[in-house]
Amino acid sequence: MQDITELTNFLKSLSDPTRLKIIEYLAKADNPRCVSKISEHISVSQSATSQHLRILRQSNLVNSTRRGYHIHYEINTEQLGDALQQLQSLLKI
């Protein structure tokens, strides 16, 4: 993360309860998950889940990989770590 604007966008992307559920699910998953598995787990339609994943992807919080007809998602731990370090630095904790 480079600046305060990127950190702000990062925090905005996590400000939705559904997106936090997605992040929590992916963090506990032992391997990348497709939209259907994610939507089933969080009890949200596949189209709504896809929209939330789009926002998380734009914030670089999740990585996506195409496998055949399906796209699988996993947490971008490097980006998450960078954001947490920047937040700690900003708050001096």
Image (spheres, rainbow, N blue to C red):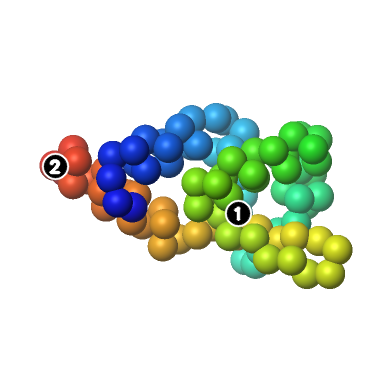
Please report whichever mark, 1 or 2, sits nearer to the chain's N-terminal start. 1
SS for callout 1: helix
Q: CA distance from mark 1 to mark 2?
A: 29 Å
Query: On the image, numbered disc 1 is attached to which residue?
Result: 26
Q: Position of residue 28 (x, y in %)?
A: 58, 56
Of 86 and 21, nearer the camera is 86
* Amino acid marked by disc 1: Leu
Q: Position of residue 31 (x, y in %)?
A: 65, 67
* Amino acid marked by disc 2: Lys
Quadrant showing the C terminus: top left
Q: Residue at 49% of width from left, 37% of height from top?
A: 14
Q: Residue at 64% of width from left, 44% of height from top?
A: 54
Q: Residue furthest left?
A: 92
**Residue 60 shown left or right of residue 25 in the figure:** left
Q: Position of residue 62 (x, y in %)?
A: 56, 54
**Residue 13 shown left or right of residue 63 in the figure:** left
Q: Residue furthest top?
A: 16
